[in-house]
Image (tube, grey):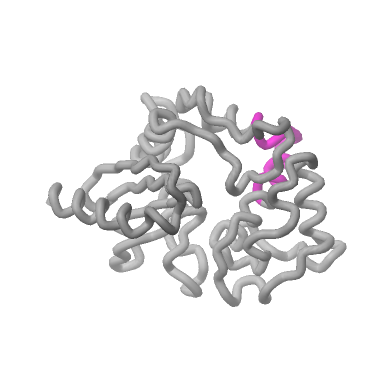
Amino acid sequence: FNTYGKGDITIRQIFSHTSGFQADTPYDDRGGISLQAAVDSIAIYSNLQFSPGTQASYGSSAYKIAARVAEVIEGKLWENIFKERIANKCEMSNTSYLSFINNTKPHAGAGVRSTMNDYIKFLTMIHNFGIYKGQRVLSENSVKTIELDQSGGINTFYGLGVWRYQIVSGFAKEVSSPSAMGIHPWINRDQKYFGIIFTQAGFDKTINTNLNFRSLVQNTIK
């Protein structure tokens, strides 16, 4: 990234979608290459859409770059980092980033496979500000930081890897991270509950129905 003029981009910009990296690249879904090879290709061949920190554009390529940074820091494969730091501690035995095709699938931004029961365990940990069954998984400060605007006001809808809703005085009453496949999790900080809608119908077909269901739940609890 330094060699190709992209070394000053920060992790915060990557997760808040203000890095300028293309949303998707030809290096996202090539199951025959490693995460390292995919991200090296992005560094060399993928042009920035805008100067980092000046605009916001949502996309999954950024997550793959962040996963590769974690690999360099830890000296381990992303799948192993995820298992050690998150999955094992949250008892998510049916969740993996490994591809059905091979074990070097590079798409850390959209390649995870899971179940409703496993995802609920992850949401439980986030809802409890980083604690699952009494064990600290993430720091409380990390979870709170994730849910704040990290774009410098460029687009307050994005936190760090989450979407922010019902923002009041800078704080989001609800956070979510809907998937392209139609999985729709959310946490309501204001009313202290969380939920998930598990479908396989795709984002475009389900997003309005999911949002309406969320509103129905919120109004019912109120």
Question: What residue sits 60% from the left and 77% below the top?
Answer: 54
Q: Nearer the viewer, residue 169 or 176?
A: 176
Q: Position of residue 221 (x, y in %)?
A: 14, 47
Q: Which residue lies most toward the right here?
A: 3
Q: What is the x, y in percent for residue 5?
A: 81, 68
Foreground: 19 or 128? 19
Residue name at image x 87 percent, y 62 percent: 3
Q: Is residue 48 above or below residue 218?
A: below
Range drawn in magenta? 66-80
Above or below residue 16? Residue 76 is above
Say if residue 145 shows up in the picture: no
Location of residue 130 (image quadrant): top left
Quadrant into which the N terminus falls: bottom right
Q: Is residue 73 in the magenta section? A: yes
**The one of 4 and 202 positioned closer to us in this rendering:** 202
Provide residue 14's location: percent of width, then percent of height. 61, 59
Residue 128 shows in this picture? yes
Specify whether 35 is left or right of 190: right
Q: Residue at x 40, y 42 (%)?
A: 199
**Is 78 in the magenta?**
yes
